[in-house]
Image (tube, helix red, strand yellow):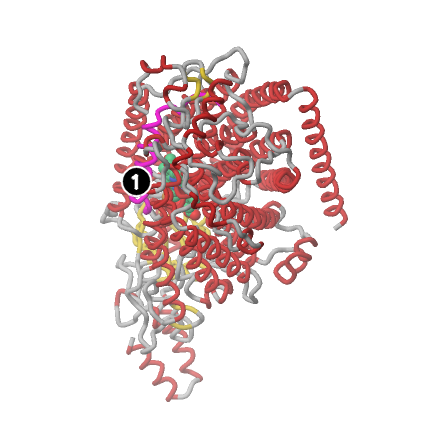
Amino acid sequence: MLTTILGLITIILILIILFQISKASEMLATLKGEDKSMNMANKGNALMFMLFLIFGLVGSVWSTFHYADLFLPVPSSVHGIWLRNMFFWTLVATVPVFIVTHIALFYFTYKYQHSKDRKSYYYPHNNKLELIWTVIPSIVLILLVYEGIRNWYKITGEAPKSSMIVEATAQQFMWNLRYSGADNQLGSKTVKNIGKDNGLNVLGQIWTDAKNHDDFLADELHLPINKPVLVKINSIDVLHSFYLPHFRVKMDAVPGIPTQFWFIPTKTTEQMRQELDDPTFNYELACAELCGQAHFNMRRVVVVEEEAEFEAWKAKQKTTYAKIKEAAAAESGTASAAEKEDETKEMSSL
Amino acid sequence: MAGTKVKLDTHTGAHDHHHDDHHDHHHEETFISKYIFSQDHKMIAKQFLITGIIWAFIGVMFSVLFRLQLAWPNESFPILEMLLGGWAEGGKLAPSFYYGLVTMHGTIMVFFVLTAGLSGTFSNLLIPLQIGARDMASPFLNMLSYWFFFAAGVVMAISLFVQTGPATGGWTVYPPLSALPEASPGSGLGMTLWLFSMVLFIVSSLLGGLNYITTVLNMRTKGMTMMRMPLTIWAFFFTAILGVLSFPVLLSGCILLLFDRSLGTNFYLSDIFIGGEPLVNAAGDLMQGGSPILFQHLFWFLGHPEVYIVILPAMGMVSEVLATNAKKPIFGYKAMVLSILAITVLAFLVWAHHMFISGMNPFVGSIFVLFTLLIAVPSAIKVFNWIATIWRGNISFTPAMLFAIGFVSLFISGGLTGIYLGNSALDIPLHDTYFVVAHFHIVMGMAAGYGLFTGVYHWFPKLFNGRMMNRTLGYFHFWVTFIGSYCIFWPMHYMGMTGVPRRYFQFDTFETFNVYQDLNVFITVAAIVVFFGQFLFVINFFYSAVKGPRMKNLNPWKSNALEWTTPMKPGHGNWPGAIPSVHRWAYDYGKNGHEFIPQVVPNGAVDTKEKNTKGAH
Ligand code: HEM
Ligand SMILES: [Cu+2]
Ligand SMILES: [Cu+2]
């Protein structure tokens, strides 16, 4: 509290001092003559712009390299590499424009500061020049559009037939990950069934659909390396966004409208740990669309592993269907016959 | 020079027979009709401006409060508890109030400050003054426009004090989050008030817009052809067209959302499980068939033009101020007008670039890539033309000029990152990260704010009876703001390169994103400095409005435009005598050795040598 008050007092003092300086300089200007003081102001500000240009350019380049270590590492997916290249070409197109226009802007500002001896040059237009700086950006942009749309279609195009199908269902505030099991097909579901079967049916799977019987839920997103995976994305409440920063994957989860994204992971978690020299590194799944108070807290760990490891992990997972049957069996030992009947009815009617 | 001025005077005198005594009707003014329910466009401009400044103070202060959380997530700030009470128990912001602050910040800055405060102020002030009209086409609607804006502000302010807090869904208020009170406390009464406030705001902006368009088309003085208008007027004109055509779409989007919230419809809702049960309609059936993406289309059909509604007036004023202070004609006047036109048309065809990964059909996305990158062409033309305007000029560094130059720099920096975001494939990693925050704050937030400062410093004497602002304070203000804004927003690009998502209350849940602790502190400190730096402006503004010295010369910036032919204290009606007529375009600076030739100077009154310079204007 004390520091806050002291801070505020300091700020107020600074403001008062600046105010007094400014009023004094206004008075001085009336004494010395408006022209003279404007002359000083012109020199001072022109110089400031020049300094801003120099420190700005040096600073922006320096800080970019300084922070480059913290940027995401080389993408761990096939399309991530395409995007990296696209980013590079966009840099090639834009950085020179950034530098050249800024040099021109601030250098001209400095050079053509007011002087009694200079007359400004009446130069209302030059059609040829304007044509040049219309056509060149147009061509560059068309090239970028071409490259962009080509990649966009490849990325959003149909997933390879061999893709493994995984489902991510968002809800406030977690991701439910469902694997399609041996048949590589996700069973159907409806929000009406959510919470049934004593709360074990978290996704609202419909058990009459046999495709559901081999589906299992997982706490971590495990993926085999170098195999295409097709993520079916949806939400049961508000918008969310399925976001895997290291794989350059992002797609909104929309209630009522299923979306999807397919990609090929190219580096295992283990490889990344070695590459980054960080034994605790983990790929992460996050939410990228504001979904409420705990939006910043929807984390899942993502594990990319060798095919064999993946199969071993998969073999250990238990299907939801089996879990529910087990629970029902355990219950039937203690529950009354009537209740038992109820439950079986419920399950089969779904 | 002196010769020109003398001729100018004879000229206005000679036109006395044009005199119409329209302005005589307004002589008996009470306090209420003069300062409150005023129908004088200059007073309405002041009302918009001062209301805008108050909102800007609130909106920026909110950003400082939530920046404290981002820089020091584990610290407690007693001052927060003092200010916010239960929302910051123990001196730490509650997440839902953090989102409330973010949402209010965005809404206030985009709509109340940069739309009403900027376009409302300067369209009102400058359209009649620069085209030579006594007032707006309908002064009464103009007054209503302000009072609807005022009412919108009152409703939004009330929403800050309701028990469940203000809206928390972001300024884009995407449903279902904003439609379901069960999904978030802010989606209760706070959201209803948000929508209600927006409806009032839209009415305000439509009334204003229709008035601006009519006035520009019908009330130009003799000789003021469209192609002789200053670029400010062109910008206000197209801004108004954009607003009139796009705000109604947001209105319908808001009304459908109100229906979903209170009448049990499901335009935006489908297959939802919330509050422990499936969402059903009145008949008890599961709600199906609604589309949250529909709302996004309706929102961004306004939302994108909105960013141009914000930036075009700033561009217009910057063009005017650059030319005036560089004492050179704006380079490529026709190209400037055409590029405003092109931006206006294209602005309606790019909205879905905010939705590339919303689940929209990828083919539709690719069409929007094309139009989005095309809109960069007229934007680039404008930048090149501004730079060409100062080339070989003779620049006076007034505070307005500094902000105009700063604007060009920010527009370049922010516009270039738009090329990354507009390319749908590249938008996959960048969407909803801090890269976007950097982009739109630089190109829209900061740049338009600079437009506002440019306008205030330049036209202050026309707002406050010939008083001038203090130049030196203006310089301090500019340099703190200019250096500060880059310090705040430039580093956010780096966070975007690490994929750090926007709208995160804290980053420490993710190893990937929790690497910028120092940078976040740096950004917050810069934000605090810039926030307090704005007091240099506020002090200067209010002090000068009351005690500032009056201009020694009726045309202190040696400008060609018409507003500087009005007297020191223009009454309602602007010119005491006849409205001057216009004989040339607004940009005869540096022609034939004349530093400037006001629009009211007839051809014969200056050197006739000019005959050989093409007289297209
Ligand atoms: C060079 C031209 C521009 C291009 C190509 C461009 C492109 C984009 C794109 C594609 C996005 C969406 C990014 C995302 O959400 O992932 C975006 C966001 C945004 N842009 Fe621009 N932009 C340009 C100029 C402007 C201008 C002139 C303004 C304002 C005056 C502006 C204001 C905004 C705002 C406010 C957002 C954020 C919206 C949100 O809340 O998500 N942009 N821009
Ligand atoms: Cu979220
Ligand atoms: Cu847009």
Q: Secondary structure at mark 1?
A: helix
Classify residue A320 by image quadrant: bottom left
- Residue B99 included in the magenta stretch of the image: no
Q: Is residue B96 above or below residue B559?
A: below
Asked if residue B434 can be seen in this view, the reply is no
Q: Is residue B357 above or below residue B592?
A: below
Q: Where residue A236 appears, x then y in whole percent?
A: 38, 64
Residue, x 34% and y 74% (percent of image)?
Answer: B281
Q: Where residue B477 appears, x then y in whole percent?
A: 61, 34
Q: The magenta stretch spans which residues?
A: B326-352
Q: Where residue A203 appears, x then y in whole percent?
A: 37, 66
- Residue B341 included in the magenta stretch of the image: yes
Asked if residue A36 can be seen in this view, the reply is yes
On the image, numbered disc 1 is attached to which residue?
Answer: B346
Q: Where residue B431 appears, x then y in whole percent?
A: 40, 44
Q: Is residue A57 left or right of residue A323?
A: right
Q: Main secondary structure of the magenta part?
A: helix
Depth order, front residue of A341/A101: A101
Tell me which amino acid carries mark 1.
Answer: Leu
Depth order, front residue of A140/A235: A140
Q: Chain of mark 1?
A: B
Depth order, front residue of A51/B216: B216
Asked if the beta carbon under badge 1 is closer than 8 A to the nearest atom of ligand 1, the reply is no
User: How many C-alpha atoms fall within 10 Å of the one at disc 1: few (<14), some, or many (≥20)?
Assistant: some
Q: Is residue B613 left or right of residue B59?
A: left
Residue, x 30% and y 71% (percent of image)?
Answer: A207
